[in-house]
Image: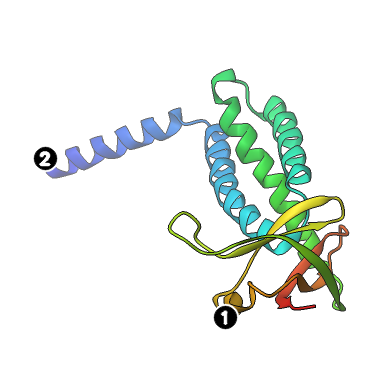
């Protein structure tokens, strides 16, 4: 009999605590968790898409600020909610760009502006290119590192995304 009373008391306490939790808090926690995942997804998609960092940053900040004013009511959480809600929107735009991309692949030849080899401070070898008015760093695979010295151009095989930004499918260093 004593066991039954204890378990019913603990069940009652759990129910009491669960009644105090607001559904809006659960929704915010789900949105924040999704925002964290979208932040890393956006980071990965940015590496594979020819888009300026400025465009991604402005889109993320503007949408994050607007959604934070609408959803968040406490000023002390604005910084986190701006980052997470901005990541939600940019991840959505990257997903739309990739999902509805053209199946035709094209080639983009870009002049290499700067070369950086892998070192203790830099995790991957990369080349800097200028494309459509902005500079962009492109990571180079280990297989092609030996071509970095004599190469002046990089040939990017890319598909045009639904929003007009190219998605890089293959990179090759070229001597000319």
Q: Earlier in the sequence, mark 2 or mark 1?
A: 2
Against 103, residue 112 (above or below) is: above
Q: Say above or below: 161 vs 151.
A: above
Residue drawn where x is 52% and y is 39% of the image: 29
Query: Residue 75: x percent and y percent?
Result: 59, 19
Tell me which colouring the rendered structure shows: rainbow
Tell me where residue 18 sits by quadrant: top left
**Could you say which is closer to the camera, residue 116 or residue 60?**
116
* Residue 64 sits in quarter: top right
Q: Give x and y (percent) for residue 169.
A: 73, 74
| Residue 11 visible from this viewpoint | yes
Q: Nearer the viewer, residue 150 or 134?
A: 150
Residue to which mark 2 is pinned: 2
Is 21 left or right of 47, judged from the image as shown? Answer: left
Residue shown at 73%/55% (left/top)? Answer: 136
Label 2 element class: helix
- Look at the picture and state if 167 lies above or below 11: below
Give above or below for 72 relative to 88: above
In this rendering, the label closer to the viewer, 2 or 1: 1
Residue drawn at x 72%, y 41% as measured from the top left: 57
Return the residue at label 1: 143
Question: Which quarter of the figure is the C terminus placed in?
Answer: bottom right
Q: In the rendering, at what x and y percent does residue 168 appear?
A: 74, 69
Alpha-carbon neighbours of circle 2 within 10 Å: few (<14), some, or many (≥20)?
Answer: few
Q: Is residue 176 left or right of residue 6?
A: right
Secondary structure under tag 1 reads helix
């Amino acid at each position: 009999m004593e066991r039954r009373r204890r378990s019913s008391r603990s069940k009652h306490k759990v129910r009491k605590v669960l009644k105090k939790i607001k559904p809006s808090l659960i929704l915010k926690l789900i949105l924040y968790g999704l925002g964290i995942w979208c932040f890393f997804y956006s980071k990965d998609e940015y590496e594979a898409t020819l888009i300026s960092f400025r465009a991604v940053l402005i889109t993320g900040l503007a949408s994050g600020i607007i959604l934070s004013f609408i959803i968040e009511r406490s000023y002390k959480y604005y910084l986190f909610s701006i980052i997470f809600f901005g990541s939600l929107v940019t991840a959505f735009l990257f997903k739309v760009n990739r999902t509805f991309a053209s199946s035709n692949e094209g080639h983009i030849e870009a002049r290499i502006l700067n070369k950086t080899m892998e070192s203790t401070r830099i995790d991957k070898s990369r080349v800097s290119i200028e494309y459509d008015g902005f500079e962009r760093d492109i990571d180079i695979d280990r297989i092609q590192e030996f071509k970095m010295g004599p190469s002046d151009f990089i040939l990017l095989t890319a598909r045009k995304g639904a929003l007009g930004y190219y998605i890089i499918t293959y990179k090759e260093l070229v001597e000319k």
